[in-house]
Amino acid sequence: MPDPAAVNGEPQPRSEELRVIELELRRQNEQLRALIENISDIITIISEDGTIRYESPSIERILGYRAEDLIGKNVVDFIHPEDTAATVRTLKAAFGKAGVAQSTELRFRHRDGSWRVIEVIGKRPTNPPDIAGVVVNSRDVTERKRIEAEARQHQAELCHLLRLSTVGEMAAGLAHELNQPLAAITNYAKGCARRIVSSAGKPSQIVPALEEIAAQAMRAGDIIRRLRNLSRKGEVRREPVEVNEIVREVARFVDAEVHERAVRLQLDLAPQLPQVCADAIEMEQVILNLVRNGLEAVSGVEGGARELRLRTTAADDTLEIAISDTGEGLAADVAEKMFDPFFSTKPGVLGMGLSISRSIVEAHGGRLWATPNLPRGTTFRFTLPVNSNIAER
């Protein structure tokens, strides 16, 4: 086919305008290539059937593959089997509506055989003249995930330390509470033995005493169970829980201390509260810590009512737990620092209770704060989202 730019069969030089355009296009292509080659993330183009059509050179630095190792292969072949279904759903969603980004996390096999956690964002361009696929931006977040896991483990260690500290401080009260059912068991057992030896009692008279022994033994076992649950160390488990039942459990736990300190404990629990997704032990720890703070606050009150009130309410998509006391209240300088780690106004105390409690509540998607009461006292409140789908940490 003859060159349209030729005259009488002789090629003619291109115009200066075309030459400038060609140079500009070449410059732009080189800039684009340099940008793609040096970008910190991986850029991939994937067709609708999962075939990799393009792979940026950064794939070699991040995952060990050369681009040509992956082009033409199906992306599913390199993804962890447990993450395949989520990846396919994300790709389908990206193809379903142009211009709408879809994201997920998956495990991608490194060339050395290890699995790397990759955060991907895929989107089908809205007006692609020559891109018949989804453009995927991928980032290796393995190290970030490791650091987050270590932080969660550290948080769990601190929570466990606080629980043990709390149990240690309550040891005297627990011993007193355990002594009551144990003493009752001893007395009933001795009474039964005397009646049997002397043949003075009929079986029908001994049975109620034996039933009382069983009831007191169950009471002692319940006290020990609550202590064991609070002090146990295990994996955090988020599941639907009844907050009112947790509040009642805490009230039973501090019953001996409440009587010892001559405090009036009131429960004002809203009926039919919705469930929340939470770790029951962590929630019990938060409420117990706030209740014990309240007990200590009212213990120093002279000439006034020593009252502690636990209240639960629900509004919209939020559930609120409030612990109010009639203590002296908080000084302004204390109120500003009380949630700081290692801050305490009591000697010999670690000063991590409120800090850890706030961290637990925030990890559950809520918040914890304190407000002054009138004429005196303090109310600690924290919220939890209702019907939360928080995944396990």
Image (tube, helix red, strand yellow):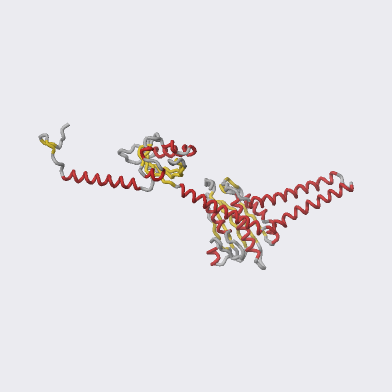
Q: Quadrant of residue 332?
A: bottom right
Picture coordinates of residue 46 (x, y %)?
38, 38
Q: Quadrant of residue 354?
A: bottom right
Residue 274 shows in the view:
no
The image shows a total of numbered marks equal to 0
Picture coordinates of residue 306 (x, y %)?
66, 63
Picture coordinates of residue 146 (x, y %)?
49, 49
Residue 296 shows in the view:
yes
Residue 224 or 96: which is nearer the viewer? 224
Q: In what quadrant of the picture does the N terminus appear? A: top left
- Tell me: 42 left or right of 269: left
Which residue is at 31% across, 38% downward? 130
- Tell me: 235 left or right of 213: left
Which residue is at 72% across, 51% downward? 220
Q: Is residue 261 above or below residue 41?
A: below
Q: Quadrant of residue 71?
A: top left
Residue 272 or 246: which is nearer the viewer? 246
Picture coordinates of residue 333 (x, y %)?
54, 67
